[in-house]
Amino acid sequence: MGLIGFGKDIEKSLLEATSPFVFSTVNERSILRFLKLIACDNGKIGIYAKLVDDRNESAHPNGNIFYSTEAALDIKITEILRVVAEIQTHSKPVIEHCYREFLLQNHDPDEREYADAVDQIREVLIHGNYLSQKDIEICLAFDIESLADRPGIDAMRELHAALAEKYRVEDATTPA
């Protein structure tokens, strides 16, 4: 359903994509339509598209950014970070579902691709799904006990603990 509105050639290319980088061939404003898949409405998508337009009007392909004052640039950066956080909030249910399925399908070291938990997490979960640090933070907050009635829960807890040990972001205010 996310491909509604794309031409046949682009649709075929996107359906056969093996990497998110295939989507770079689609116009930025058009690619924002995919945000409907994570419950962003047209109003929000319009706001996000306006940021793309603003960027196009104020940034040059050579890397120069044209703002009249540092304060104006700070305001734009704050707005972009706000929008990114908003989109991340919309992504949360998708990331949680992805992580839940990862735990259910990858907890048995005898049946998964990598016996080592950290290798499995890095290659299958993180690289396989192109997860960002913010996405990983959502996984870290996952309620592992919601799977307590499932066979293999101890192994799932071990995977979750391995994720936490390897990828938990330390609080910058905590002394080393």
Image (spheres, rainbow, N blue to C red):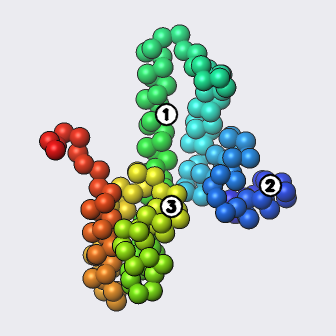
First in sequence: mark 2 vs mark 1: 2
Q: Is residue 150 above or below residue 98?
A: below
Real-space CA distance between mark 3 and mark 2, rounded to the nearest whole angstrom: 25 Å
**Image depth: mark 3 or mark 1 in front:** 3
Vertically, is 118 above or below 3?
below
- For the N terminus, the quadrant is bottom right
Sequence order check, earlier mark of 3 and 2: 2
Identify the residue at image location x=68%, y=41%.
28
Q: Position of residue 76 (x, y in %)?
A: 49, 25
Q: Quadrant of the C terminus?
A: top left
Is residue 120 in view? yes
Which residue is denoted by mark 3 in the rendering? 127
Q: Which of pointers 3 and 1 lies earlier in the amino acid sequence? A: 1
Does the image show residue 143? Answer: no
Disc 1 crowd rating (10 Å Cα; few below 14, some 14-19, many 20+) is some
Query: Which residue corresponds to mark 1?
Result: 80
Mark 2 Cα shell of 10 Å, populated few (<14), some (14-19), many (≥20): some
Labels 3 and 2 touching (C-beta < 8 A): no
Residue type marked 1 = Ile
The x, y position of residue 153, in whole percent, is 30, 83
Point out the frontmost of discs 2 and 1: 2
**x, y percent for residue 40:** 56, 50
Mark 1 lies on a secondary structure that is helix
Residue in the foreground of this view, choosing between 140 and 34: 140
Identify which amino acid the numbered label 3 is placed on.
His
Q: Which residue is mark 2?
A: 10
The local secondary structure at tag 3 comes to helix
